[in-house]
Image: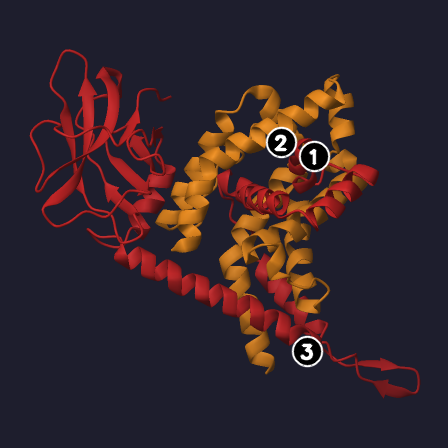
């Protein structure tokens, strides 16, 4: 019997005793539960990323470095000099693995950012984006179930759209963002293309107040875009905060 | 060799210190204790006391696991100092200059924050009390005056909602 009621609690570290042992024993031999556990673990690892970031005190690194150096120094013991056990040989493979993973991740991330045309590298504007009050609209994949998008709309009307899961299009086709108003024509939020992995990060002008908009959608249109939507809604949002 | 090791630690610190400090501060609610957690986390890496197991997840998750365990240990050992913010809302903790972020991190941060906000309050409490409070489900049930089965269901349902909302972004980031 699969311990489905306990997998989430296990990943959160909220189980103890026999319940915890039962989960560990079960997932060691059950691939589906182990797969669910791995996904839960990945989700839990993102929880702190939802917090507003706080900068550590500037002197923290100096203190860590000083202590790390101190732990590497030889010490005097009794009548002779005894060298502190050389942790370097135990520690080097660990740090090498960590740095290799970090470098690989950084290279991949940098490659992804470079591919995210159009426009300049998003660093400074993204930092500014993170500080602006605004709304986050989540578009669900109505026409393409694997697709999703997040539209961040700042109070001053500027927007950024992050998309995943859309199929790359041929040159003569394009995706287009729409703000659909009740009793009035839809207003375009611009066109965009996704990369080979179906990802895009684009600036999206928000021409209408969200209070006047009944739905936000993404459609596929002939390049370079249409005056009004002609395609089905591939992504859509009808409610937002 | 000595310079190379220290620079490896510095690379890790530059990349993850902000995230770890933020997590620690959310748990312990005190800047000095959070700094202690930050120091302990990186020195445990340095000493080789914590072995990185790729099978248990990626580097950020691994580091945050060390930090979270240490923070919860402190929370339990110094309750008079450290329970200040146990029930604070998840976002808007402090107003300090944010570290420089890239597009991925901001998108994920906004997505995680909105996914949590969309959870029913009971589900969100079950997640937060477990993850940030270090409570067991038995303790949560007792604290909220709810049956244990209810807490387990809420936790599972919350995790399923979070998985549905966040897994596509996580997967997209990994494949990138």
Q: Secondary structure at mark 1?
A: helix
The chain that hosts pointer 1 is: A
The quarter of the image holding the N terminus of chain B is bottom right
Q: Which residue is mark 3?
A: A88
Query: In the figure, is residue A4 to the left or right of A44?
Result: right
Q: Which residue is mark 2?
A: B127
Q: Earlier in the sequence, mark 3 or mark 1?
A: 1
Q: Residues within 10 Å of mark 1 (few under 14, many from 20)?
A: many
Q: Nearer the viewer, residue A118 or A21?
A: A21
Q: Position of residue B33 (x, y in %)?
A: 69, 46
- Determine the colour of chain B: orange
Report the mark closest to the observer, 3 or 2: 2
Residue A196 visible in the shown view: yes
Report the mark closest to the observer, 3 or 1: 1
Residue under disc 3 on the same chain as residue under disc 2:
no
Residue B84 visible in the shown view: no
Q: Which mark is residue B173?
A: none
Query: In the figure, is residue A54 to the left or right of A64?
Result: left
Residue under disc 1 on the same chain as residue under disc 2:
no
Q: Position of residue A99 (x, y in %)?
A: 53, 68
Label 1 close to label 2 by CB (< 8 Å): no
Q: What whole-number distance in Å separates the C-alpha atoms at marks 3 and 2?
A: 39 Å
Q: Nearer the viewer, residue A153 or A107?
A: A107
Q: Which residue is mark 1?
A: A6
Q: What whole-number distance in Å separates the C-alpha atoms at marks 3 and 1?
A: 40 Å
């Amino acid at each position: 019997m699969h311990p489905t009621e306990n997998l989430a609690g296990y990943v959160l570290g909220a189980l103890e005793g026999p319940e915890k042992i039962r989960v560990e024993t079960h997932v060691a031999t059950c691939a589906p539960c182990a797969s669910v556990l791995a996904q839960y673990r990945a989700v839990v690892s993102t929880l702190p990323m939802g917090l507003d970031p706080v900068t550590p005190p500037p002197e923290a690194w100096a203190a860590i470095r000083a202590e790390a150096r101190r732990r590497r120094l030889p010490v005097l013991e009794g009548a002779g000099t005894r060298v502190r056990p050389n942790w370097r040989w135990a520690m080097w493979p660990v740090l090498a693995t960590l740095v290799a993973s970090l470098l690989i991740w950084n290279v991949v991330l940098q490659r992804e950012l470079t591919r995210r045309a159009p426009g300049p590298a998003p660093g400074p504007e993204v930092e500014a984006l993170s500080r602006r009050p605004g709304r986050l609209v989540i578009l669900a994949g109505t026409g393409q179930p694997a697709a999703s998008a997040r539209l961040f709309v700042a109070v001053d009307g500027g927007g950024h759209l992050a998309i995943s899961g859309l199929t790359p299009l041929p040159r003569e086709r394009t995706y287009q963002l729409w703000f659909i108003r009740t009793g009035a024509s839809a207003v375009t939020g611009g066109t965009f293309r996704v990369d080979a992995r179906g990802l895009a990060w684009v600036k999206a002008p928000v021409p209408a107040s969200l209070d006047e908009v009944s739905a936000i959608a993404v459609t596929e249109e002939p390049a370079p875009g249409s005056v009004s939507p002609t395609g089905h809604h591939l992504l859509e949002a009808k409610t937002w905060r | 060799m000595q310079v190379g090791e220290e620079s490896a630690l510095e690379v890790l610190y530059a990349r993850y210190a902000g995230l770890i400090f933020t997590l620690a501060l959310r748990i312990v609610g005190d800047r000095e204790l959070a700094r202690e957690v930050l120091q302990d986390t990186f020195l445990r890496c340095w000493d080789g006391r914590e072995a990185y197991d790729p099978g248990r997840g990626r580097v950020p998750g691994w580091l945050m696991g060390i930090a979270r365990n240490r923070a919860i240990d402190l929370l339990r050992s110094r309750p008079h100092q450290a329970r200040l913010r146990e029930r604070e809302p998840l976002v808007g903790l402090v107003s300090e200059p944010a570290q420089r972020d890239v597009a991925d991190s901001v998108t994920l941060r906004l997505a995680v924050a909105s996914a949590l906000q969309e959870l029913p309050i009971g589900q969100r409490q079950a997640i937060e009390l477990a993850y940030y409070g270090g409570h067991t489900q038995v303790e949560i049930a007792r604290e909220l005056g709810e049956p244990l089965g209810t807490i387990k269901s809420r936790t599972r349902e919350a995790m399923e909602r979070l998985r549905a909302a966040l897994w596509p972004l996580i997967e997209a980031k990994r494949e990138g």
